[in-house]
Image (cartoon, coloured by chain):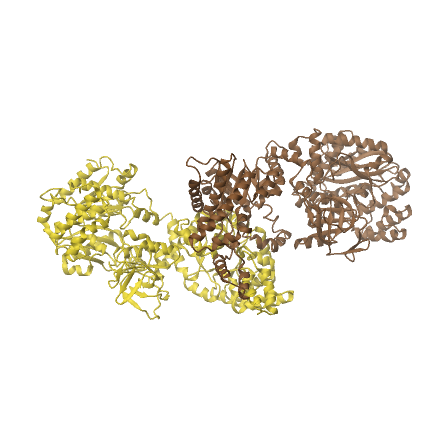
Chain colours: A brown, B yellow
């Protein structure tokens, strides 16, 4: 019979992720490789899509094909589904193209019925059969029949209490029977129908439940967060059960081929004797480390290491594996490319190049800018004495401080109003996802490094400490105790997910050590990327940091910093000057100081471009605060100098300084300002060139709105250049450019580009003006509401608003290139260091991005990823 | 011989303006009509263009054709050029396609030489011949040979002083000879060459000078101001001289077929006995009114009236005419459609419809929005007692006050820094154009209603008083005297160009009476226009003014005015409310007051759309000033209420309120605000509909930047509507729309349009954000510099910036119409009342413009002009 909806594990391979989902494709691949996979088959994503198209109804013919495929399993295992003598039990697991861990459903032990139970008991013992029975009712009841967890927990509670245990797996046979009876009654009461004891009905219901779970709330949320298409659908994998819970000769575990936290090349994982897989992940019982498997099952241990080796060779990556040992026999239940911490991703990527598993470009692609950022997460300041409450497992690196909350909903609500929160839970489940996303840090009292909380936290980069067993949580009173200390909801604690430390109060943090592999990976990234990565650096020390960090130029030197500090009195003298001569004298002093600044900067950046933005901020930023002066005046604490300052402050006061007399406008209104700056820069460059250096100054005119003001500013620059530079031309390379930071400049970028050597998008101001969002005013008060209500997908000051601001940038780039094909185009707003934005700039063909010195490594890596994403030779 | 560069007056007509220039075409037309035009020919604009292309050199063959054409004049007049017996004298006058009065050169009396002078003396008298000789040297010396005025004036000064006269025309024969000798010597000294006494050399040099004058500074300035193409070139008209200065039997004059100041249908003009035309225009001698011509030349007078009648029938418009009477014979030297005051344009347009000369649409096209604006110019408040210094001629209507300046350069310089100035001159010349443009008002002590100052001032709409003979100007001391009063440069005076009054100091002004013809013309305009004209009106009284003025809807009702005045304490209570209940209570009171406002507004505008903008300004605008509170606090003048206010003011204080928490942002952050407003409006409309009215409320959401915030705001509006309106639907027509006033909204206008019934461009904010110009901050300090330095062609807050802001508007309209073809599109920024901007909106297919109530008439007319300009059936 030709199968339309079903494909056996024997017939597929890893390339069929679209059809089989990731789990199914990998099961087929492992089967093809001859690894010990329990036999089974995959119901394809096409069946799920057909079901979705038809209101959730299974497509015609599906169950006939399933029956046929089950027959093949029966032959393979010499068992029979529903058979009283040699009963076959099946699992049904969801598995979509993209991993959605914990988001969808799994049903085990299908085919266990009052009829098949005795044979199972005969084969694996009565306790096992009763435990499997209890598990089926529990899981099937919840997942397939929709009975709430609490209903079942309530039914079991008297029995657990009577036995003095907290978990059913610790019960004896008799109590397990009692639990099963209680569950069955509770399920009948809740659903109004008896539990389905027909094995085929169980199987069909389980398959439909898996399909149905694709559209569950958790799954939809996860897909939205991860930009996964809702139309893909999931596959369902039906597989022969093998049992890790038949007794001390059995076990189950989760393993990684390398350490997913550190990246070290050694097997890593946990296992439990006599348990089913869900017990490991759920963190209900304390696991043993994988290294101890050799003590219990030496043969299986060796066999498992062989499987690891073969999987890494096949996938050319670290894999994670779920395995079960049934009565001494090893089975691999699933594998996939494993999730890992940022640090591990870096180490693995570099070491796999050394092991010749992958090439450098692939290594670059394996380590994301997000991961690098996480790696650069701060940690507790080692010089601070810590009041450590307890130490748990270092589950997700980085340090975090925040107010304690005990529910995911509260975490979300508090985060929405801008609070930092640490979510404290006994353990987390997929229901808590929104809280994990919202929290600054996560602390659990149970569960290991592969518990739900740990996996999710590592995935989203939230620091987490898990399995901190000393922490006793009292949800009812909203507090937790550690020894004698009580911490209430709202109290601030700090956690360090790299060390596992939990500390009362807020702990100062420091930047982390850089892993030794980073430099190599970043050099490979430099080979891959198309765009230059420059730094926004104002003074020589910043420039030095930037150059060390790999910046190949300065994209933005804000000269206003040259006007502050000890120079402020001079600047004020220039502003307050009523006579021309006074202004000239003050400017001359400023000239000397600026020339010194530029001399140092050009020396540090010798041979690399240095982009100097002419003065941008409004003059009143250099004057005292109006309110302060008025208060002094009201108090009578006021002399003639104060009076003059007050007059000037009033004269330069602005209602909306962000859109006032600043940038090129100020330059045209006070021509000596720019002339002084240009002279200082060109004189410094002349001196450097004379000393044998290679200065590359770039003069940038800020806040241009019209072609005419740029033309006027450039004329002023050239007039100074004509005086300063030899008639034979400058003995160095210098350029003139404009910032595109008003929407109008973006609209007329073609006309602007025709006058300059380079354009630099100032996307901070451009975002402010395009939205009409004054960052000072909306970031704190409006942005939390907009982000939490979904009015904005991202903070547009962090990630470029592609639809609005990005559209203007795109129009501007097209017009600029048309008017001046050789114009150099860059960005020097904060978006220059944001990976998503960097990808956008790559797509528009930018020549460089410029960002703050400490983000240079992230930008280098992001530029490489952007290049890989747009490289037509790279298939993804 | 086929003529390539030259065309006789006999061969052309009025349609050949491109080839012959306006003057040449009209001379040909009059010749064709058989009017008494002295014979002549036109050297075409093609010759000028060829000369421009060849560095100013006359094209090959030109002079040969000129000689041929001169021969025809000789035959016609029975005279000969350069002949000793019957000498023909010629004039050469420039004449481009578009009138450029006074901008280019004229040379008269060409062909007068020592050889031809005796015959001329014999024919018209010796004094005449000597005067003509003197005039030739003076004019040819300046215009053709480039000798400065001062050089010639210096040469003549001793002779004038000896004779005790101020002008050469008052000299006797002997003195005229002395002047000629002195001029000739001065010209030879200045140019280093003898004066050209060969008649053909004179003619060729004069023609080249006329062509050359096309590129003179004055002409280029004029063309730039009037948007005339530099490549058109000028024609040169060579015509037989006729002489108005042969004695009392001759004269010359300038006339209009109707009164160019009032529009009255009666001949109007000035003449001088025994004078050449330049004497009338220059205002050197005092002219006689045209009505008195009948006393001197009754036949010529009748003949002239006949010419007037025929010209008006031919041109279907008011014409002006230059005429000369030579020994009792009338000659028409030129005609053109005459310039007129705004009031005259209106009256003529309406009366010519009544006379069936033109149709109503033509009448609408003849009266421009600029003229209407001028007509609406203020005049002195009649209730103020005036200290009238003197009364001159009412040369250009409107009242103006300003500081006295005595030179055009100073007028320009002072105006550039924002001062209002009145330019005071004995008389003006084309050299003074930039000063006339810059001045708020003009006062001259000599010259009539057709003097240069009067004509130019009427043309550009600057109030002017001319020929105020009592005004004695002392340029050296920079003052003028009127009787005992001395007025210095910098003193403020006021003038009323409608009455001729000159007043010391600043005089309050009032709006003018509306001419009775205006309503008829505006009704015709309403028939012509495509766009609706709505008003920005906040309260019922404004709306009433607007409806009376012809507004057919309210495009912008700013509800913030409902929150001010006596309501301010209530608004503050709502803002300061810490408990929900307090806010609800304050809102309820505000609701009642707003419902009343809306009730009145809907009543006044019954049957017409009323667009209510939900609250836009930031909340701190309703709170006291921060500095003031701090000062009070410093003074100890502070109680608990002040303390609460200070806390609120600090909380709502914004760095850049224009881009802060306002508009829809505020609506989303404080949801009760908008809910209250919508409820008040819909309840008012319900009540009005119940009372049999026809309310048409439109709810407008301001400051939208993203589709999502609009969607959220509309959802809130609909939620209120669902409560307020019957389940069966509203018993009236209501709509929801969005303002497009952030650049981002313009970029995503397609998405926005899909949710609304209408869009309204808020071009004030859009201009602010697109330029990054805070209007409060840049208008006073930056705009004068930008306008005077040509960095901006117009104030973008007055006339829409087509290249930048306009481009965004255009993109938005295209996207909006694509997404929602029925969306109604309007504008409610101040550009809605600006004629140039209205033309732009018409071209983009806007449905309506909305402007302040007092600009409604201008907008109605401008919309009609815009419709005519874009009407494919109208040829222009």
Task: Name the side, left or right, on which B701 lies relative to A403.
Answer: left
* Residue at the (57%, 66%) spot, across then down: B634
Kindly indicate the quadrant of the structure image that contains residue A853: top right
Percent position (x, y) of residue B458? 30, 57
Kindly indicate the quadrant of the structure image that contains residue A200: top right
- For the residue pair A631 and B732, the one nearer the viewer reads as A631
* Vertical comparison of A76 with B531: above or below: above
Is residue B236 among the parts visible in the rendering?
A: yes
Is residue B730 among the parts visible in the rendering?
A: no
Percent position (x, y) of residue B598? 52, 65
Task: Count the labels in the image.
Answer: 0
Task: Name the side, left or right, on which B199 lies relative to B681.
Answer: left
Quadrant of image for the N terminus of chain B: top left
- For the residue pair B584 and B564, the one nearer the viewer reads as B564
- For the residue pair B686 and A853, the one nearer the viewer reads as A853
Kindly indicate the quadrant of the structure image that contains residue B207: top left
* Vertical comparison of B358 with A738: above or below: below
* Vertical comparison of B315 with A850: above or below: below
Percent position (x, y) of residue A650? 49, 59
Task: Name the side, left or right, on which B422 lies relative to B286.
Answer: right
Percent position (x, y) of residue B541? 46, 67
């Amino acid at each position: 019979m030709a199968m339309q909806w079903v494909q056996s594990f024997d017939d597929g391979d890893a390339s069929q992720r679209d059809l089989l989902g990731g789990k199914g494709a990998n099961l087929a691949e492992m089967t093809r490789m001859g690894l010990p996979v329990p036999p089974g088959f995959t119901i394809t994503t096409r069946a799920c899509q057909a079901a979705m198209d038809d209101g959730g109804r299974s497509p015609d013919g599906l169950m006939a094909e399933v029956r046929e495929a089950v027959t093949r399993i029966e032959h393979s295992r010499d068992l029979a589904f529903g058979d009283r003598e040699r009963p076959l039990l099946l699992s049904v697991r969801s598995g979509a193209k993209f991993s959605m861990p914990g988001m969808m459903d799994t049903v085990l032990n299908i085919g266990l019925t009052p009829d098949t139970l005795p044979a199972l008991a005969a084969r694996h013992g009565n306790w096992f059969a009763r435990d499997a029975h209890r598990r089926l009712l529990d899981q099937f009841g919840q997942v397939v029949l929709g009975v709430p967890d609490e209903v079942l927990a309530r039914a079991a509670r008297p029995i657990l209490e009577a036995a003095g245990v907290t978990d059913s797996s610790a019960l004896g046979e008799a109590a397990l029977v009692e639990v099963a009876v209680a569950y069955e009654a509770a399920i009948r009461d809740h659903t109004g129908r008896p539990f389905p004891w027909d094995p085929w009905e169980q199987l069909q219901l389980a398959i439909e439940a898996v399909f149905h779970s694709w559209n569950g709330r958790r799954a939809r949320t996860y897909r939205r967060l991860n930009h996964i298409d809702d139309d893909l659908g999931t596959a369902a994998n039906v597989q022969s059960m093998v049992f890790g819970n038949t007794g001390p000769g059995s076990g189950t575990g989760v393993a990684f081929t390398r350490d997913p936290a550190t990246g070290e090349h050694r097997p890593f994982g946990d296992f439990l004797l006599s348990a089913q897989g869900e017990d490991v992940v759920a963190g209900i019982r304390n696991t043993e480390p994988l290294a101890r498997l050799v003590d219990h099952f030496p043969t299986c241990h060796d066999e498992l290491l062989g499987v690891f080796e073969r999987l890494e060779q096949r996938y050319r990556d670290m894999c994670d594996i779920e395995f079960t040992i049934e009565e001494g026999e090893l089975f691999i239940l699933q594998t996939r490319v494993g999730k890992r911490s940022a640090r591990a991703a870096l180490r693995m990527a570099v070491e796999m190049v050394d092991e010749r598993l992958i090439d450098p470009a692939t290594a670059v692609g394996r380590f994301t800018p997000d991961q690098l950022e996480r790696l650069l997460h701060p940690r507790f300041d080692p010089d601070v004495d810590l009041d450590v409450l307890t130490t748990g497992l270092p589950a997700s690196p980085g340090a975090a401080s925040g107010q304690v909350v005990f529910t995911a909903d509260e975490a979300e609500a508090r985060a929405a109003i801008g609070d930092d929160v640490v979510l404290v839970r006994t353990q987390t489940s997929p229901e808590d996802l929104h809280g994990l996303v919202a929290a600054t840090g996560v602390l659990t009292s149970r569960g290991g490094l592969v518990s739900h909380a740990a996996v999710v936290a590592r995935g989203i980069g939230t620091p987490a400490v898990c399995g901190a067993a000393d922490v006793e949580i009292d949800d009812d009173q909203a507090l937790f105790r550690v020894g004698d200390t009580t911490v209430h909801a709202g109290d601030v604690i700090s956690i360090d997910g790299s060390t596992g430390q939990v500390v009362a109060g807020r702990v100062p943090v420091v930047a982390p050590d850089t892993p030794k592999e980073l430099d190599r990976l970043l050099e490979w990234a430099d080979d891959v990327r198309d765009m230059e990565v420059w730094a926004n650096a104002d003074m020589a020390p910043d420039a030095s940091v930037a150059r060390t960090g790999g910046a190949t130029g300065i994209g933005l030197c804000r000269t206003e910093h040259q006007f502050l500090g000890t120079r402020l009195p001079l600047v004020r003298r220039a502003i307050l000057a009523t006579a021309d001569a006074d202004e000239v004298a003050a400017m001359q002093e400023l000239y000397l100081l600026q020339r010194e600044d530029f001399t140092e900067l050009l020396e540090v950046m010798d041979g690399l471009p240095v982009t100097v933005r002419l003065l941008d901020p409004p003059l009143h930023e250099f004057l005292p605060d109006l309110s302060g002066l008025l208060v002094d005046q009201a108090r009578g604490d006021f002399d003639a100098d104060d009076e003059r300052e007050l007059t000037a402050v009033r004269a330069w006061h602005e209602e909306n300084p962000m859109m006032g007399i600043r940038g090129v406008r100020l330059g045209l209104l006070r021509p000596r300002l720019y002339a002084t700056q240009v002279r200082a820069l060109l004189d410094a460059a002349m001196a450097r060139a004379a000393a044998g250096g290679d200065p590359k100054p770039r003069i940038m005119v800020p806040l241009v709105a019209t072609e005419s003001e740029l033309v006027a500013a450039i004329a002023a620059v050239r007039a100074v250049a004509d005086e300063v530079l030899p008639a034979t031309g400058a003995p160095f390379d210098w350029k003139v450019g404009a910032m595109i930071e008003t929407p109008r400049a973006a609209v007329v970028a073609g006309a602007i580009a025709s006058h300059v050597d380079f354009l630099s998008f100032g996307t901070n101001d451009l975002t402010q003006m395009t939205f009409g969002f004054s960052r000072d005013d909306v970031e704190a008060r409006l942005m939390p509401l907009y982000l939490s209500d979904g009015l904005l997908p991202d903070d547009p000051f962090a990630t470029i608003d592609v639809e609005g601001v990005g559209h203007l940038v795109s129009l501007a780039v097209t017009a600029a290139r048309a008017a001046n094909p050789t114009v150099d185009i860059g960005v020097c707003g904060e978006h220059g260091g944001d990976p998503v934005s960097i990808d956008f700039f790559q797509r528009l063909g930018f020549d460089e991005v410029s960002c703050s010195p400490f983000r240079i490594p992230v930008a280098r890596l992001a530029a490489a990823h952007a290049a890989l994403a747009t490289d037509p030779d790279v298939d993804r």
